[in-house]
Image: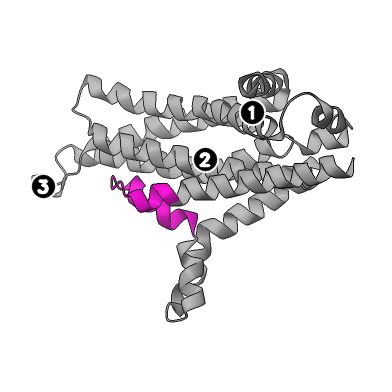
Amino acid sequence: MIFQVARKELKSMFSSPMGWVILTVLIFVFATYFINAVTQYFSMMTGSIKSNGRIGVTLFVGQSLFGLASLVMLFAVPLLSMRLIAEERRTQTLTFLLSAPISLTEIVLGKFLGLIVFLMIIITVITTMLFTLNNWTELDFGYVFSNVLGLVLLVASFSALGLFFSSVTSQPVIAGLLSFVALFALLGIDQFLAANTSNPLSQLLQDLSLMRHFEPLSQGLIDSKDIIFFLLFTGIFLILTLRRLNAERLRA
């Protein structure tokens, strides 16, 4: 049933203009940025820099592309996740979904999986762009894999949080706004509190920063601590969404 719910959500995304607009705009932005990054790399590396100052094309282009992707997903995921549950509550179809012969776990995981599959299309396009560079140079596949893993984990965290906020309101716009504000705060919390590192509470809050755990992966460093953080973050918000829907089912 999880896959049936996911297929339904994925189908609804492609049946709405917003899904196609977001997908088209993002692919266009990433393609344009990729071409500009490759062009800039050639212009910078053709004889004007000493050999010991040159950097690899994977690092130069990949760092720019995945850095842009992490920022763009901050806006794209709330737009896509805001309607997952809030829209069903607004149109009064959530009651029928909750009363259907399907568990809440399957509903939550199905909606989450549907969103992830949609976002994976974008990540696949980005990765394919980088792989095209392998036709004329030797790519650092370890660096690419680390960035892809980091971006997938980051997007999963975004999606779980967005799904939770979509479950607490009947207005998709409010859900999207709450998701964006929360994600923006969680991404930059370490920067806001950088001046007060001596405070234990401040240090704890900095450890909750999504960007702090994403940056090592974006640099090609795979640490189990960062992976576990993203998995726990995603799992916690999926559980919170499940509990929120369970409370609503009991009241119905």
Residue drawn at x 31%, y 24% is 131
Which mark is first along the chain, 2 or 1? Answer: 1
Does 167 sit above or below residue 42?
below
Q: CA distance from mark 3 to mark 2?
A: 38 Å
Residue 155's disc is 2
Q: CA distance from mark 3 to mark 1?
A: 53 Å
Which mark is first along the chain, 1 or 3? Answer: 3
Element class at badge 2: helix
Q: Which residues are magenta?
A: 209-228
Q: Amino acid at mark 3?
A: Lys
Q: Nearer the viewer, residue 40 or 15?
A: 15
From the viewer's perspective, tell me whether residue 246 is left or right of residue 146: right
Residue 110's disc is 1
Dot 1 alpha-carbon crowd within 10 angstroms: few under 14, some 14 to 19, many 20 or more? many
Q: Position of residue 48 (x, y in %)?
A: 16, 44
Q: Nearer the viewer, residue 3 or 77?
A: 3
> In which quadrant is the N terminus drawn?
top right
- Residue beneath disc 3: 50
